[in-house]
Image (cartoon, grey):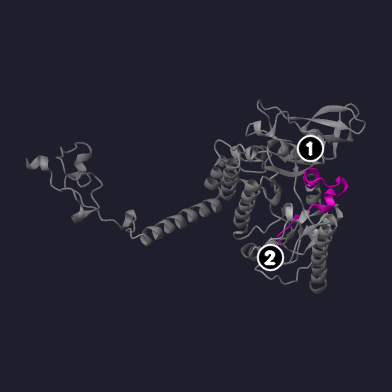
């Protein structure tokens, strides 16, 4: 990015505009060949029809404040004109579906969007990833795409930390992703990256509920009626197999810098236009929530919400400071707000909002739901097979199940349960037990009671 600065804004913007126009031209060509929704097109990489849910405009609108926040800070640091901040911000969406993300973000004031119809993973392998300022994408959820994306982001964050710079990311993923082991691993990796760069990390980075707020990761969605999270309606591409998106989409954001920079980003996205209920006249009015944040983000307890919903300690509903259209301020309970955005700073806050199952809920669901129980049993069986294969590959012997083992025991073993025999040193205790010894002739202990022989 520093190399580009030497060219000056005009040549740089010209190149960026060329990339965007090429991407839009490809999208228009695909529409002409495959219909208005681009569903009949061919991709130069393997795709899963179930991944074809295009990001709606509303989702992009909810993340625009974060883009503006980073664009302005970037302009100040590089001494660029403030009026050109958003037009020069390079937004990278590495996963191409129909190419519509560039058009929608362009309409929202960000013309430099790179969304090319090419193999993202091949670009990584060949070192052909374009230069960008912000990563924003709705990645495929199938196969190992999430794992590969998280690994790549960790590498990018490691490089940014080494340079002393920031590289924000915003990923639109199902809310249940936050509870998965792959995401916990991602947070732990971020803690290691920022810890090595002198940024405070969580004391227990292996736990998502302790790590996310400490590594500057937060979650954004739209606020609906009663202050509750509102599900995005993704645009369905013909051939995806489902008419409606089966999951709750959530923006996973991070990489904005230290605690102070992350706090500014959180507050900026939380202070969107909303509607507040005024009990005095029983009507709704335009307002801007300021959020219940009172302390710096890094000092918040893991269960705190930045501008989300849920119960605070003591079971009380959180109140939001709001600014009304006439400039006056007041505090409103969460259910007296509608519209705008919700921001959560931890997995526990997502659990309180009903967007993430707790560990207890998952365990209970596995025990009570027949399908979940079957999946759990299959997963355990697959894990055991994997472990057995690993043992054999290392030259170890395969463990036999209890039904395959032959046990030998002393003829008086049954009586030893109530009246234990006095066994001498070096005598096999299993042979003289009710269960018996499974080693047989290979047992290194004696099957003769040395105490009786003496």
Q: Quadrant of the N terminus?
A: bottom right
Residue occupying the point 38% across, 62% down: 393
- Disc 2 designates what residue? 49
Q: Is residue 228 left or right of residue 183?
A: right
Residue 88 horizontal/vertical position (percent)? 82, 53
Gap in angstroms between the C-alphas marked 1 and 2: 35 Å
Q: Quadrant of residue 300?
A: top right
Residue furthest bottom in the image: 33
The stretch drawn in magenta includes residue 94: yes
- Disc 1 designates what residue? 226
Q: Give the main secondary structure of the magenta stretch.
A: helix
Q: Is residue 132 visible?
A: no
Q: Quadrant of residue 18?
A: bottom right
Q: Secondary structure at mark 1?
A: helix
In front here: 294 or 280?
294
**Quick check: 397 above or below 289?**
below
**Span shown in magenta:** 67-95
In front here: 162 or 446?
162
Q: Secondary structure at mark 2?
A: helix
Q: Is residue 306 visible?
A: yes
Disc 1 crowd rating (10 Å Cα; few below 14, some 14-19, many 20+) is some
The stretch drawn in magenta includes residue 257: no
The disc, 1 or 2, on the residue closer to the chain's N-terminal end is: 2
């Amino acid at each position: 990015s520093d190399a580009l600065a030497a060219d000056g804004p005009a040549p740089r913007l010209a190149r960026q505009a060329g990339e965007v126009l090429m991407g839009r031209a490809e999208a228009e060509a695909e529409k002409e060949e495959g219909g208005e929704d681009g569903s009949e097109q061919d991709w130069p990489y393997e795709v899963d029809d179930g991944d074809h849910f295009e990001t709606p405009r509303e989702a992009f609108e909810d993340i625009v404040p974060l883009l503006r926040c980073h664009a302005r800070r970037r302009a100040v640091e590089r001494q660029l004109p403030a009026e050109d901040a958003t037009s020069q911000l390079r937004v990278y969406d590495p996963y191409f579906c129909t190419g519509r993300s560039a058009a929608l973000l362009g309409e929202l004031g960000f013309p430099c969007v790179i969304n090319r119809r090419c193999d993202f993973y091949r670009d990584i392998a060949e070192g052909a990833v374009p230069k960008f300022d912000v990563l924003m994408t709705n990645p495929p959820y199938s196969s190992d795409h999430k794992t590969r994306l998280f690994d790549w982001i960790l590498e990018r964050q490691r490089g940014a930390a080494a340079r002393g710079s920031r590289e924000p990311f915003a990923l639109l993923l199902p809310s249940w992703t936050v509870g998965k082991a792959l995401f916990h691993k991602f947070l732990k990796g971020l803690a290691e990256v920022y810890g090595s760069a002198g940024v405070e990390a969580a004391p227990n980075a292996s736990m998502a509920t302790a790590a996310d707020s400490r590594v500057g990761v937060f979650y954004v969605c739209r606020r609906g009626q009663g202050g509750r999270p509102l599900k995005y309606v993704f645009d369905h591409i013909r051939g995806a197999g489902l008419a409606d998106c089966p999951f709750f989409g959530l923006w996973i954001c991070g990489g904005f810098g230290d605690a102070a920079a992350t706090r500014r980003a959180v507050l900026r996205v939380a202070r969107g236009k909303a509607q507040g209920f005024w009990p005095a006249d029983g009507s709704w009015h335009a307002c801007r929530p300021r959020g219940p944040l009172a302390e710096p983000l890094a000092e918040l307890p893991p269960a705190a919400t930045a501008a989300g919903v849920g119960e605070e300690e003591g079971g009380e509903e959180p109140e939001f400071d709001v600014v009304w259209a006439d400039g006056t301020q007041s505090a409103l309970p969460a259910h007296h707000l509608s519209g705008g955005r919700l921001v959560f700073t931890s997995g526990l806050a997502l659990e309180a909002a009903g967007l993430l199952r707790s560990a207890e809920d998952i365990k209970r669901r596995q025990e009570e739901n027949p399908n979940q129980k079957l999946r759990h049993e299959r997963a355990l069986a697959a894990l055991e097979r994997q472990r057995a294969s690993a043992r054999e590959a290392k030259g170890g012997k395969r463990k036999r199940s209890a039904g395959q083992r032959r046990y030998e025991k002393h003829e008086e073993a049954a009586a030893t349960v109530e009246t234990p025999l006095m066994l001498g040193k070096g005598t096999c205790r299993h042979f003289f037990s009710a269960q018996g010894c499974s080693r047989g002739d290979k047992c290194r202990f004696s099957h003769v009671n040395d105490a009786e022989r003496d």
